[in-house]
Each structure stands twice: as C-alpha cells, then as structure tokens.
Amino acid sequence: MAESPAENNRLRQLEERKAFEELRDKVIQELKVLIEHPVFHDIKEMHLLGESTFTDINNISVIFKNILVRIEKEYDFIASEWILKILKSEFYNIRVMLDLLLSGIKNFRVYPKNNFIGYGDEKRSFAEFSEFILARVKYLEHLNYYLSALYDGLKREAQQVTLMANNDFVRKIESTRNDLVKEVEDFRRLRNNADNAKTENIYNNAVVKYRKYEWGYRIAFFLTLALVFGVSLWFWNSDYLNNIINQPSYASSAIFWSVKITSLIACITLLTYFLKQSSHHQKLADQNYQTQLELQAYPSFMESIPTEEAASVRKELALKYFGREVDGAAHKDMSNLISDQMKSTTDMVKATTEAIKNLKG
C-alpha cells in the first residue's frame, strides 16, 4: 500500500530532524574536545612562557565555554543547521592551532632554547602565537553572537510566517539567510585578501624592478644601435673613405682590417648582450606578475575548497610559489656568448693578419 503524501512529508521531516540532531551533537562534542584540550591544563605549569600567554590561553577556554552554552540553549531548531556548519569549520582550524601550540610547549620542556612555534613560513613566539589564536577565537565568538542575533530575528519572522501563512515572509527569510551566507563569505575573502596583501606587494615590487631593468637594457640596445649607425654615417662622409679609395695599401693593412673586424664583433656582442638581458628581465617580470595575479585570485579560489582539504592545497601552493630555483640559463648563455665572441675576434684578427702578411710577401 502506497504511503500518503502527508506520511511521506512526516517521514522526511523525521529524517531531517535526525540528521540535524546528529550534526548538533557532533558540533557540541567537538567543542567539548576543544575545551578539554591538553593545552589548557599543561599551560598552568609553564610559568616561564609569560603572563600574557597564560592569560590568553585562559581567555580562549572561557570563550569556548560561552559558545557551548549558547549552542546548547539556542541552536535546537533545524533552521540553525547552517550556523552549526559554519562553527564546525572554524573549530577544525582552531584545533590545528592548539595542537601546534601544545607541540611547541612539549618541545620547549625538552629544549628550552626552542621558545618559538613554526607556523607556515614564519616563526612566532609563544606569546605571539597564543595572541594570534585568541584573535581567531574572538572572531569566532563575535561571529557566533552575530549569527545568533540574526537567527533570533529569523525565528521571529518564521513565527509570523506560521501565524499569517504568508509566502512573502518565507521569501524574505530565505533572502536574509542568503545575504548572511554571502556576507560571511565576503568577510572571509576580505580577511584572506588582507593576509595576502604583504605577499602581493613583494611580488609587485619585483615586477616594477624587473620592468625597469628590462626597459633600461632595451633603451641601451636602441641607443647602441643608433650610435653604430651614426658612426657608420660619419665614417662614410669623412676622409676615412677617401683614404681607402686613394690609398689601396691603407685598405690592405692589418691594422685596418683588425680594427674593422674587432669593432664589428664588439658592436654585435654589445647589442646581443643588451637584447638578451632585456628579454631575461622581461621574463622575470612576467613570471612575478603572473604569481601576483594568482595570489589575488587565491581567496576566491579557496572558497571552493572544502575545509578538510584546505591545508593540503595550501601546502601544494606554497611549494609552487616558494623555494623555486633561479633560472640561470640566461646568465650562462651570456657568459658563453661573450667568451665565444672574444675567441672569434682573436681568431679573426690573427687570420686577417696572416693573410695580409702573405699577400705582401
């Protein structure tokens, strides 16, 4: 016998309620694990870490307990499921930081000189790192209060919807919820943009520096080319050409050809050097500019990554952006070019001198 639509709706609501209660219990359990984290017990014995560190850790524990009370008392309706999911993702990040702090404390007990914690590419003292965690937890507390206040407003409007059975209120609640989700996402994006600003500025300075070198060598290339062309015109209009025409022995002298070939090769070497250096610095500027654009897109990119995978993605990106070897191919090519040109110049001068001597002999 087929079940009626009303029965199907009732079963669906029961399943949704069960899923919500499982999520709520899981969030509460994770928060209790944070409250009972060993770092809140071990820190009492670590007086050498400083008073500020001890105070920050105690404040973190108090904030966790306040959030737990609010969750147990207020978030008991299915409509608060989205708030619990936001808090759950933040609990994971904070637990990772507390684990790092605890590991640093244990290491400090064995090796007192290691009074810092490695976080990413930075090293922070216990006081700085505990202050950093406290700021993150305070942000979570403010977010919780904000979500709770908005949730209270949503519940009031939901009651009005129930009493008045007006679909306009339903759409308004959904719109408010969507606006809040968007606001939280925008807040995270702005925070990531602020975190990346210093790194982006470093790459921007590199782009500016390499662009200056690029155009400096390029201008030197054009100036040298213009100088060579101007000197050629000057020789053409001077007595130099008359000496070649009226004195054949002058044109056949070793000095004439040695100077001519050496000057030609030197000009070619200089022009090639300037052009290669300009291309090399253009490549470096383009690479740094590409990295700068990718860092600007990083916050939006990370929004689509699940919280559980975010740490591994950051690690892969760090390996891509930092620790890369400098491309030495350009410097090697320039060194080989100059060496080859000098060798060619010497061989050409010797060959020309010998040829002229043979002609005179």
Image: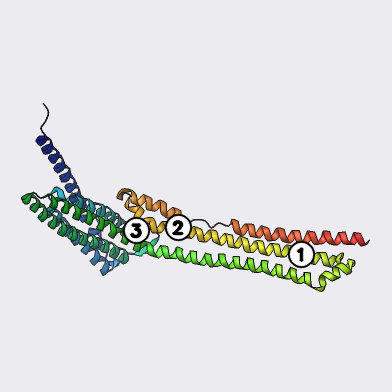
Residue 114 visible = no
Q: Are marks 3 and 1 in contact (CB under 8 Å)?
A: no
**Amino acid type of disc 1?**
Thr
Q: Position of residue 81 (x, y in %)?
A: 18, 49
Depicted 1 relative to depicted 70: above or below? above
Q: Of the residues tagged 3 and 1, which is closer to the observer? A: 1
Q: Position of residue 186 (x, y in %)?
A: 29, 58
Disc on the earlier residue, 2 or 1: 1
Q: Which residue is mark 2?
A: 291
Query: Rounded to the nearest whole Å, what is the CA distance between mark 2 and mark 1?
Result: 43 Å
293 on left or right of 172: right
Identified at 40% across, 58% down, the residue is 295
Q: Which residue is mark 3?
A: 107
Element under label 1? helix
**Amino acid type of disc 3?**
Asn
Q: Position of residue 61 (x, y in %)?
A: 20, 60
Q: Quadrant of the N terminus?
A: top left
For disc 1, the neighbor class at 10 Å (few under 14, some 14 to 19, many from 20) is some
- Asked where in the image residue 255 lies, by quadrant, the reply is bottom right
195 on left or right of 150: right
Q: Which mark is residue 262?
A: 1
Element under label 2? helix
Element under label 3? helix
Disc on the earlier residue, 3 or 1: 3
Q: Of the residues tagged 2 and 3, which is closer to the observer? A: 2
